[in-house]
Amino acid sequence: MTNTKYDVITFGRSSIDLYSQDIGSAFKDIKGFDAFVGGSPLNIAVGCARLGIKTSLLTAVGNDKVGEFIVNFLNQEGVNTQCIPIKNSARSSAVVLGIEPPDKFPLVFYRDNAADSQVDIDDVDKANIPGHRILLINGTAMNREPSRSATFYAAEIANHNEVEVVLDLDFRADQWHDYRAYGITMRAVLPKVKIAIGTEEEILAATMVNTSQVTIKHQQISAPEISGDINESIKRLLATGIETLIVKRGKDGASICRKDGSMQNVPGFPVEVLNILGAGDAFASGFLYGVLQGWDMYKACRMGNASGAHVVTQKGCANFMPTLEESLAFIEKNGGF
């Protein structure tokens, strides 16, 4: 990898995403699928690149056609792929998704022996973390070894080189052998993190004490129902030492929670929802854009809300991330920052 200074490096999963072509049909009645790309860190990387941010993705693909499909898309989008190793003993990931708006989005992960879970410490060393301004790490990348250790190592390198670490909590329930292991792992890595981003459900998952708190309906792995006291969970995560916790609240926008106990709500943008999958990743890319511009947290979250609002009106994730021009025009049309 060259010594070019990049803005953001995102670390974690990547996949081919097969989205139902039959919007509104039950999963069992789907007749065909559109092939896109996905995985939260990949989506965020593409979203950042479309906003004009110099972005790298640290993931891995298998020595297979799916891997070629993923890397080809990233190259076309201008994402730096020099730190994406090929893992000959593993397979590129796949996800199959149904679209039944407004509130049913079932999905199936194919991540047995996933190549992106094989990213290791050597791969992190080759990725030149110090050559970036922000490192974004991802919850699912810590569900197993060797990517778990690699993530902690990447955060450690970032801390030692004044690279800001942002954590996307990204709770995917079926990717953990025990739901509680997710929370234990997140709380372990949070002291290395400056800003954490998550939904209310992900924040509750990061502090859960009993697996009975989790309910999954319609195989919506990305959107489980989790019981608990959200305000207490926010306090507990802030107590780990992070400066800021951003709570994504969907149509209600986002909340900025600071370690001094203050909270600031940022309104969202009302739109007609087609598909909620990928909206949180779009939010993260818009938010990171604002942070990199030196904007205050409110304005950065407003930018994130605009990116998320754009993507929920689309049928896919990375393939439909907005450009900077589209986001700014959308914001101006809908009340400004």
Image (spheres, rainbow, N blue to C red):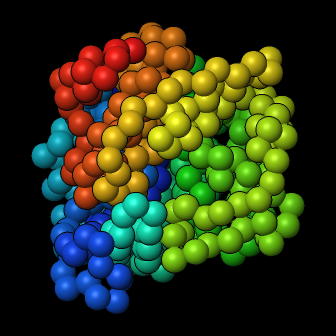
Where does the image place residue 100, in percent across and percent down from the top left?
36, 70
Residues 83 and 69: in front is 69
Depicted 77 relative to depicted 84: above or below: above
Q: Quadrant of the image for the N terminus?
A: top left
Residues 117 and 289: in front is 289
Instruction: Name which residue lies at 54% across and 17% down.
Output: 297
Where does the image place residue 89, in percent across and percent down from the top left?
40, 78
Instruction: Report whether residue 228 is seen.
Output: yes
Instruction: Name which residue lies at 29% across and 79% down.
Output: 25
Residues 48 and 254: in front is 254
Q: Quadrant of the image for the C terminus?
A: top left
The total number of labels drawn is 0
Instruction: Report whether residue 116 is seen.
Output: no
Q: Residue furthest bottom?
A: 28
Depicted 261 relative to depicted 23: above or below: above
Where does the image place residue 274, in percent across and percent down from the top left?
31, 56
Depicted 333 relative to depicted 60: above or below: above
Q: Is residue 190 left or right of residue 59?
A: right
Q: Is residue 3 left or right of residue 128?
A: left
Q: Residue furthest left?
A: 76
Q: Is residue 73 left or right of residue 294?
A: left
Where does the image place residue 3, in percent across and percent down from the top left?
31, 26
Q: Quadrant of residue 63?
A: bottom left
Depicted 263 relative to depicted 193: above or below: above
Residues 85 and 99: in front is 99
Q: Is residue 263 left or right of residue 65?
A: right
Instruction: Name which residue lies at 48% across and 80% down.
Output: 112
Instruction: Name which residue lies at 54% across and 24% down.
Output: 266
Q: Quadrant of residue 132?
A: top left
